[in-house]
Image (cartoon, rainbow, N blue to C red):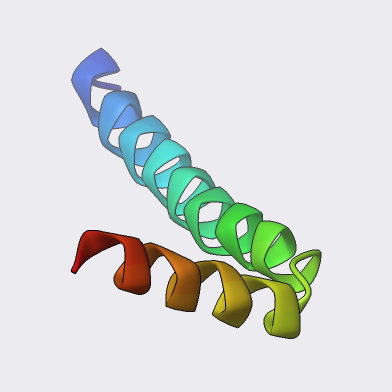
């Protein structure tokens, strides 16, 4: 049995775990934001920039 073959499985597993976390964490943060507040803040930023 070759030790280096186990590294591929570990790399794939860690990559999949990282991809799952990268997709879940931003979605959870976005779900906590009130859309009305976010749109209002964006409008204020645009008005102050002009």
**Image quadrant where one finds the N terminus:** top left
Q: Position of residue 25 (x, y in %)?
A: 63, 53
Q: Residue at x 63, y 61 (%)?
A: 24
Residue in the image at 72% along x and 84% along y = 36
Image location (x, y in percent) of residue 45? 39, 63
Which of 27/36 is in front?
36
Residue beneath the point at 26% across and 36% down: 8
Left or right position of 19 against 33: left
Figure check: 8 above or below 36: above
Residue 49 is left or right of residue 22, and the answer is left
Q: In which quarter of the image is the C terminus?
A: bottom left
Location of residue 32 by image quarter: bottom right
Q: Could you tell me residue 28's position as x and y percent?
A: 73, 62
Outermost residue to the top: 3
Q: In which quarter of the image is residue 39?
A: bottom right
Answer above or below: position of 34 versus 20. below
Give residue 49's position: percent from left, percent from top: 23, 61
| Residue at the image position 41 percent from the left and 32 percent from the top | 10
């Amino acid at each position: 049995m070759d030790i280096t073959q186990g590294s591929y499985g570990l790399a794939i597993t860690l990559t999949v775990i990282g991809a799952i976390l990268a997709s879940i964490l931003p979605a959870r943060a976005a779900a906590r934001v009130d859309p009305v507040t976010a749109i209002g803040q964006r409008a204020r930023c645009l008005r102050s920039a002009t």
